[in-house]
Image (cartoon, rainbow, N blue to C red):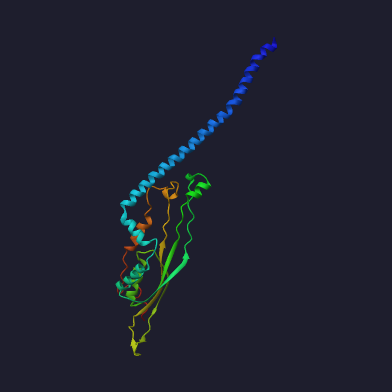
């Protein structure tokens, strides 16, 4: 009698165990599928956000062609030497100094590229590596120039050079009094002006190779919906500043190269 009473609970317990044993893999599969769907939805949302960012960036790019043109001129993908020579000669002419020598040197030194920014949205190290854009490397074209002129002309030329609307670096600078006299081609001695100065400088002009981004939505380049133009605004502000005028009677000397 007691055995008959225990048969039902034991059968029920065995049925529950079998049901759990059979249902658990299905339950685990359902949970895994739900997790995969959530991850896929998150990636889809991120792709749609990147798509909106690309559309905004494209619209801003098309509406600001003056800025694009200026940046491409300031730091082109390939620096045309003729344009650089013309710019330096134009500065000399506008400063009333004589550009007596200008030599072109190819600078083989290149700036180290900045490490790519890792984007967590790419999902994992492999995806991050695939999404990291190629980082362009800055290269330069170097010029050595010799310029003669009076103090005010040299000063004006250096001010123009500091505001040159080309990415540049003034690598070396030397100013000294010019020779008091020099010989002409006929051998005659010619007296030079007392305030004549000689400027020798090395100036490098930059160029930045273009890179292909492709259609990778997870690129860090598309993480923002607008361009950061802070550097452009600062550059335009500095270039527009005027050189301060020297007034007679003020502190210091109007020409430190004269006795």
- Looking at the picture, how far across and down is residue 121, in whole percent? 47, 44
Residue under the image location 50 percent in, 33 percent down: 34
Which residue is the extreme one toward the top? 1
Residue under the image location 38 percent in, 57 percent down: 231
Q: The C terminus lies in which quarter of the figure?
A: bottom left
Q: The N terminus lies in which quarter of the figure?
A: top right
- Residue 96 occupies quadrant: bottom left
Q: Which residue is nearer to you in this view: 73 or 256?
A: 73
- Looking at the picture, how far across and down is residue 110, in whole percent? 47, 64
Q: Which residue is nearer to you in this view: 159 or 127?
A: 127
In the picture provided, is 114 more to the left or to the right than 60?
A: right
- Residue 8 occupies quadrant: top right
- Looking at the picture, how far across and down is residue 254, in whole percent? 33, 75
Which residue is the extreme one toward the right? 2
- Looking at the picture, how far across and down is residue 126, in whole percent? 52, 47
Residue under the image location 66 percent in, 12 percent down: 5
């Amino acid at each position: 009698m007691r055995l008959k009473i225990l048969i039902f609970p034991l059968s029920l317990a065995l049925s529950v165990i079998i049901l759990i044993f059979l249902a658990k893999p299905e339950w685990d599969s359902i949970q895994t599928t739900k997790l995969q769907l959530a991850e896929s939805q998150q990636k889809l949302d991120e792709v749609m956000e990147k798509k909106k960012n690309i559309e905004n960036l494209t619209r801003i790019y098309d509406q600001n062609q003056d800025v694009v043109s200026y940046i491409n001129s300031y730091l082109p993908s390939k620096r045309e030497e003729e344009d650089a020579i013309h710019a330096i000669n134009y500065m000399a002419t506008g400063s009333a100094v004589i550009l007596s020598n200008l030599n072109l040197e190819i600078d083989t030194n290149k700036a180290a590229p900045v490490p790519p920014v890792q984007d967590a949205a790419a999902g994992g190290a492999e995806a991050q590596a695939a999404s990291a854009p190629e980082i362009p490397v800055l290269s330069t074209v170097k010029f050595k120039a010799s310029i003669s002129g009076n103090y005010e002309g040299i000063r004006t030329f250096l001010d123009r050079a500091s505001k040159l609307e080309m990415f540049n670096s003034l690598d070396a600078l030397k100013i000294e009094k010019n020779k008091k006299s020099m010989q002409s081609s006929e051998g005659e001695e010619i007296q030079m002006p007392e305030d004549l100065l000689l400027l020798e400088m090395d100036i490098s002009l930059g160029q930045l190779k273009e890179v292909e981004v492709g259609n990778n939505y997870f690129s860090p380049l598309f993480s923002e919906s607008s361009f950061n133009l802070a550097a452009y605004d600062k550059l335009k502000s500095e270039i527009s500043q005027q050189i301060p005028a020297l007034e007679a009677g003020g502190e210091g000397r109007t020409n430190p190269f004269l006795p």
